[in-house]
Image (tube, rainbow, N blue to C red):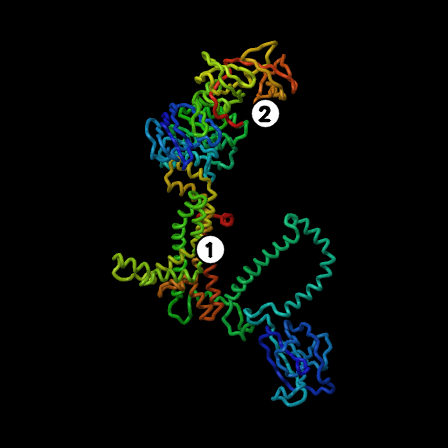
Amino acid sequence: MNDGTPNLAATQDAVLAQLQITPSLPQPSLPEPAAPAPAPAPSTGGGLGISPSLPSAGSSGISPSLPGSSTPAPSAPASPPSGSGSNLNITITNPDKLPSLPAGQHELKLVIQDPAKQVPADSGLGFIEIFIAIVAALLIAPFVQREAGKWTANLNALQFVQKNGIAISAYLLIFTIGWIVFMIILPQLYMFDFSFRHNLPPPDIGGPADTYTLKNYKYLIFGRESDSDLFNWLHLEVFAKTIFASVIVTLINFALCYPLAFFMAQSVRGRSQRLLFLCLLLPFWVNEILRAFAFKLIFADLGLINSFLIGIGILDQPYDFLSANVALYTGLTYAYILLMIFPLYNAIESLDPNQVEAARDMGASWITIHRRVVMPHAKPGIASGCTMVFMLTAGALAAPNILGGPSSLWFTQIIYQWYNTGGNWPQGSAYAFVLLISCIIFVRIMMRVFKVGLGDIAKR
Amino acid sequence: MSSVELDQVTIRFGDFVAVDNCNLTIESGEFFSFLGPSGCGKTTILRAVSGFNDPTEGSVRIGAKDMRGIGPNNRPTALIFQNLALFPLMSVADNIAFGLEVRGIPYNERRRRAEELLNLIALPGQGDKMVSELSGGQRQRVAIARALAVEPEVLLLDEPLSALDLKLRQHMRTELRAIQQRVGITFIYITHDQGEALTMSDRIAVMSAGIVQQVGNGSEIYNNPATSFVASFVGENNAFFGKVSRAEGNYAVIDTSFGPLRGINNRGLSEGDEAYLFIRPEVLRPATGDASGDTVFETEALKEEFEGSFLHVFLKSENADKPYKMAIVNDANVTRHAAGTNVKVTFDADRAVALPVGELADE
């Protein structure tokens, strides 16, 4: 604003703006230089973000006037709105700053696309939304004030509020609802919606081509129509392999953790128990990537294990643990071991030791004791641990990326490729949802088979 | 049926001696109780018999067979836990038949046996209920049935009645005794409740600090305690401290702060020994007229408590924290004693017991 003329700038989130400049009717009386325009009100065209004070358009010496706005504009004429965009009359006051136009008055038409129809990934909480929120809040405020007494009385009647007080109840409600809605439901719904859309270049988004489709899901099953195979064997096979391998990893994990959890819960007390917990926890301070690469080093051709096996003469030449996916399964098993141990520990810890002794006294062998007494008691913990390990293993990315053999592919890697190198977010979302929903169905079936309720899992 | 022999059993946990050189023979078919305050080592003995821990020294023999190295699952014993330890996820019948199940007995046979035992414990047809649907007393009986199902030679009971309320506890005492007489196997019963021990047992071992103080039937333990601990732990007792001034025949005269008092001397006290004279509240009675001698003493009445069948008079003792107690039968000519008045008290020397000074039980 160094030259004293008002500037026009669109807000940053108005990404697509078309500037159309057309010769306009002569204007007889125009103040020069134009007075600073008042702050524009939200346009009727929907979501038009214009701020006169943002110094981004340089000093091109143009003054805006908004048709349809109630604020008085210095320039009189207003061209009728056309198309889907809003119109804005702009007077060129310093024509030398716009060299391609002759001196005189011109009409500038700014066509700004509705931000709601723009690339969703770019739409943050913009100025307009905040503005609307503030206006709405101010409008509601008097009613709130008038009704506040009644509301407080009603709120206080609620048991939940009585117990926690208004401030804490409000915090709890807002936090949990906010958490659930904004952190869980909305993003997932968004991706879910995404998975039914075409992968369009940004300009076409919101256009006529932007329709719902099942093709992303169809692609996983049938592949490209031009392909000779009936089914998309490559991806289906990776999918099946991922689920199967995750089941195996979960079982190995359970087999390893159950005895340890039983030992920690029923046999060890005091110092040694705390020491054991520390030994389990501390390694997980090392980040996942570092751990995965460490595993890679251990299992590599010239790594620790091969060197040892060759050294003691069991192997003549290095065994390729990486290609055989030994490293991958080991890494995956280790990655989520805590999520298996702790639910198991919690479940077994609550078992009355006398139950074990009573069973033993009745003559039961250790296997029978575990089959008939300990495991039935720990079932919710077992279900909880297995579910978590299975879900996370099926959704793991770092370990398969780093430790997977050259020929093996984890389903998450395909998803990652769709998002990242493929640039096809709808396709990636569809794959991700297939994985998620398959895993949920699988877990629910398993829970049904072993007669575990969802509530049981939450108890642990 | 088998006898249980504890031969010089010592059990140590680190430096702590839980059971110190215990020698006992529990006869086959006997109802034998271990009585003692908590921490006296009675549960440790029970666990040594059932096989959950082996003695550090000495041996446990069941039916003349040394049990060292034989696990609890292979011993002819069954243990009833203090909290019963029924399996909450199994039905009543499955609980009772668990021992049969692990022995590989087929389902129908198990079911039949469970039903028989349910009849024995007076819960017929309740096999399909869950344990949580039963009352405390019913659970108690299910625990007994579960233990009996494996047909043990020795049944071990670890304070199984302590969780029940008073009325039920008294009922279960009779019931336990009846069950024991019906099945005829050896019962080893652990309790800190002398009422339970005295009413149910054939013989009782009183324990303190890992040492068996006395073994005998109820009246021996009560009337003729072997140590000052037994005298003070079983029933109520008044202890008079002093030095033996005379020991003649079956009697010893002890110089107490209330003058010389005489009692039975079964434990070889001789002149000059420090001793306690134990006189039970029901043995003390108000003296009549001008009675004097070594069975009469005078003290101050502190307060009276009227209990119905008895009138309890608390008397000033040598120890301000523990007044003596005199229990007078509440009959027609009972005399009342106002607080602060002097009382002349007498007793029967044959029912007063002189014992060497030793540990007294905490009230």
Image coords of residue A224 (percent x, y): 42, 70
The residue labelled by disc 2 is B320
The quarter holding residue B315 reads top right
Image coords of residue B152 (percent x, y): 38, 29
The residue labelled by disc 1 is A441
Q: Is A57 on the left-hand or right-hand side of B114?
A: right
**Front residue of this view, candidates B45 and A213:** B45
Q: Is B242 on the left-hand or right-hand side of A308?
A: right
Closer to the eye: label 1 or 2:
2
Outermost residue to the front? B272
Vertical relation: B59 (above or below) A303: above
Q: Is residue B42 visible?
A: no
Outermost residue to the bottom? A102
SS at badge 1: helix
The quarter holding residue A126 reads bottom right
Vertical relation: A340 (above or below) A354: below
Mark-to-mark CA distance, 1 and 2: 76 Å
Q: Is A318 on the left-hand or right-hand side of B315?
A: left
The amino acid type, in three-letter code, at marker 2 is Ala
Vertical relation: A186 (above or below) A444: below
**Front residue of this view, candidates A332 and B45:** B45
Label 2 lies in what chain? B
